[in-house]
Image: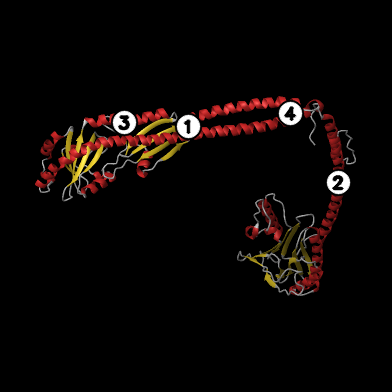
């Protein structure tokens, strides 16, 4: 029993206990309320942050679509002018007899140029998507198959029969560079009547830059950053991976980003978290594709959100809630201490009396108390002590009886293992309780014969132990009086069945070892088959049952079988407590592990093999309780003496 504090309980202990108890309650309530409040506030902040992010994303998409609508309206103002110019281009193609090389594109350009504000260039694209003629030498030979989506669009236009206008888009500066980072141009297309070529016009104008300055994606990016303080950066990139969220200039900037590549490939919106940096990058895909146009003006808006601001707000709220809880606890301590009552004297007397009783003086009385509640406690303790005294006396009697029963049961097992010339025997029996139902026996039958028995009685405890004694005596008598083995087992079954109560039975193996012939003749009455290790082949063969358990059917007939034991052979007898031994996870030791131990250690003595089996079982159960009796008998055939 723990020592009492050296401090006076009358002055401190009870008050301290009451104070601590009340404080614990206050702490629990304060912690609960603080936690609920903090979680609710945190969830509200997170929800607000998520709603703001959703609003910003929707606003960005709507703004991008609005800007694109304005640009599309402006771009379409040139459609009619460019469509009206194509008949001269088609007439020149007809006059050349379908030979693009015979067309003087420079002269044709000079003819068409006066009708346009800006610089007009002409192109001709063949069936393979290659520019085979142009007034821009730098793009001659440019192969559009390296831009699959665009190539698919111009092929559709070439195979058609009508005019098609594109949007104002970035152009490709040259065949060598191959990137869509050149100046802004308005393109239009018309297929040749024979569909061999797609005729193209490209108009470059300073007005395009001005228009995209007035309707700028850069403004959207800047305004979005101002609206959401959690945003670190905003970038808008077109389908050619050109950055468009910067002030419009002469050339575009290519963006290398796996996230943007994925968004363009899937045409889907998704987010990527960076736990190390505390950011979440969202890639919004704005689908602006016009089926009638060759180019795809769709955009990817990359928005990098930082959680630093939210984390700072949550930290402030957490600190505030902690301070509130701390104040509440402090006030609770004062109130608890003020409401505590002095109850130390009767408590101390109870502790002293119980200490004396705990040291073994069960006759020590509990001192009387005037307080009604403590009087009830005194009576209850007195009754409890009386019952403890009665239970202790009963337990001591039962333990004494079990110790006597255990000694008696052990006396029925062979006191020592006999020495048999040409053989080595070892056996052990460990009951799961003080007494058990397993037993083994070694019987001297004379004429250089020895009877070996291993058995397992149904059940555990004293009833099984008593039935074990009956079974052991009966089997020993039958083995000495009856021959052959089958007759002895049949006789034992008849006598056990006559005396057994309902539900009581015994499984056993009874065998007779002929020393001279080195033959083991056995009957197996429903028992775990003994394992025969043949040294000559390394095989392990189970000795199969030859009949049902004893005590089940009085008229049961049993057969017998025999094996020859050569030098080095082993017979391992065991009860089901061996193979059914369980570890902490209720896995069983099993016959496979038993076979593995025998195979590994077959060259040891009988006692050595027995020890290895016990060791393997102990390692397997690793301290788990023993649920069943465990009995093992090992017979080893040794070389014949010279």
Instruction: Answer left or right for 234 relative to 50.
Output: left
Is mark 3 in CB contact (under 8 Å) with mark 1? no
Question: From what the image shows, is residue 519 above or below residue 608?
Answer: below
In terms of sequence position, does the residue under pointer 3 or pointer 2 come before the other?
A: 3
Return the x and y of residue 617 as percentages of the image width and height: 68, 54
Which residue has dot 2 on it? 387
Is residue 40 visible in the rendered image? The answer is: yes
Q: Residues within 10 Å of mark 4 (few under 14, many from 20)?
A: many
In terms of sequence position, does the residue under pointer 2 or pointer 1 come before the other?
A: 1
In terms of sequence position, does the residue under pointer 1 or pointer 4 come before the other?
A: 4
Q: Distance between the residues labelled 1 and 4?
A: 43 Å
Q: Residue at x 85, y 47 (%)?
A: 392
Question: From what the image shows, is residue 478 above or below residue 297?
Answer: below
Q: Which residue is drawn at 72% across and 26% down?
A: 335
* In the foreground, 568 or 153: 153
Which residue has dot 1 on it? 307
Q: Distance between the residues labelled 4 and 3?
A: 70 Å
Return the x and y of residue 215 as percentages of the image width and height: 30, 31
Q: Distance between the residues labelled 3 and 1?
A: 29 Å
Is residue 413 visible in the rendered image? The answer is: no
In terms of sequence position, does the residue under pointer 3 or pointer 1 come before the other?
A: 3
Which residue has dot 4 on it? 19
Which residue has dot 3 on it? 216
Q: How crowded is mark 2: few (under 14 residues within 10 Å), some or many (20 or more)?
A: few
Is mark 2 in CB contact (under 8 Å) with mark 4? no
Q: What element carries label 4?
A: helix
């Amino acid at each position: 029993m723990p020592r009492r504090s050296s401090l006076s309980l009358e002055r401190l202990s009870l008050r301290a206990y009451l104070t601590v108890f009340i404080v614990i309650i206050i702490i629990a309530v304060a912690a609960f309320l603080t936690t609920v409040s903090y979680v609710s506030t945190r969830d509200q902040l997170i929800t607000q942050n998520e709603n703001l992010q959703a609003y910003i994303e929707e606003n960005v998409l709507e703004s991008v679509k609005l800007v694109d609508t304005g640009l599309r309206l402006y771009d379409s103002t040139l459609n009619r002018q460019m469509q009206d110019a194509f008949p001269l281009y088609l007439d020149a193609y007809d006059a050349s007899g379908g030979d693009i090389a015979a067309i003087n594109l420079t002269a044709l350009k000079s003819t068409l140029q006066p009708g346009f504000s800006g610089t007009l260039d002409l192109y001709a694209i063949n069936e393979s998507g290659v520019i085979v003629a142009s007034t821009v030498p730098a793009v001659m030979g440019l192969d559009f198959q390296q831009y699959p989506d665009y190539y698919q669009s111009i092929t559709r236009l070439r195979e058609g029969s009508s005019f098609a206008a594109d949007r104002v888009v970035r152009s490709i500066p040259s065949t060598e560079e191959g990137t869509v980072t050149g100046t802004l141009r308005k393109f239009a297309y018309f297929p040749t009547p024979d569909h061999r070529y797609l005729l193209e016009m490209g108009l470059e104008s300073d007005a395009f830059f001005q228009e995209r300055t007035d309707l700028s994606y850069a403004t959207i990016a800047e305004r979005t950053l101002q609206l959401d303080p959690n945003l670190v950066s905003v970038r808008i990139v077109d389908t050619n991976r050109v950055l468009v969220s910067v002030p419009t200039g002469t050339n575009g900037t290519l963006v290398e980003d796996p996230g943007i590549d994925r968004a363009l490939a899937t045409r889907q919106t998704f987010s990527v978290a960076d736990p190390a940096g505390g950011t979440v990058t969202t890639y919004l895909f704005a689908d602006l594709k016009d089926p009638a146009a060759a180019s795809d003006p769709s955009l990817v808006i990359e928005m990098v959100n930082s959680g630093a601001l939210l984390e700072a707000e949550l930290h402030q709220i957490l600190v505030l809630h902690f301070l509130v809880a701390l104040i509440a606890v402090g006030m609770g301590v004062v109130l608890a201490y003020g409401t505590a009552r002095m109850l130390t004297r009767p408590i101390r007397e109870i502790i002293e009396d119980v200490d004396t009783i705990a040291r073994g003086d069960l006759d020590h009385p509990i001192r009387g108390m005037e307080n009604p509640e403590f009087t009830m406690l005194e009576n209850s303790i007195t009754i409890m002590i009386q019952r403890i005294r009665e239970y202790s006396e009963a337990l001591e009697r039962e333990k004494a009886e079990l110790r006597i029963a255990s000694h008696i049961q052990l006396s029925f097992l062979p006191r020592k293992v006999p020495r048999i010339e040409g053989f080595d025997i070892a056996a052990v029996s460990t009951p799961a309780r003080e007494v058990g139902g397993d037993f083994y026996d070694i019987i001297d039958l004379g004429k250089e014969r020895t009877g070996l028995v291993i058995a397992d009685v149904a059940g555990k405890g004293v009833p099984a132990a008593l039935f074990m004694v009956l079974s052991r005596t009966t089997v020993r008598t039958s083995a000495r009086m009856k021959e052959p083995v089958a007759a002895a087992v049949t006789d034992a079954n008849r006598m056990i069945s006559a005396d057994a109560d309902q539900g009581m039975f015994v499984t056993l193996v009874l065998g007779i070892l002929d020393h001279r012939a080195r033959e083991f003749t056995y009957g197996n009455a429903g028992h775990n088959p003994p394992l025969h290790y043949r040294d000559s082949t390394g095989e392990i063969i189970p000795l199969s049952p030859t009949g049902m358990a004893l005590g089940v059917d009085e008229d049961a007939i049993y057969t017998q079988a025999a094996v020859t034991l050569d030098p080095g052979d082993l017979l391992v007898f065991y009860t089901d407590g061996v193979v059914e031994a369980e570890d902490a996870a209720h896995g069983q030791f099993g016959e496979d592990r038993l076979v593995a131990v025998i195979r590994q250690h077959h060259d040891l003595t009988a006692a050595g093999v027995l020890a290895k089996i016990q060791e393997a079982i102990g390692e397997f159960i690793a301290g788990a309780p023993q649920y069943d009796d465990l009995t093992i008998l090992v017979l080893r055939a040794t070389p014949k003496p010279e």
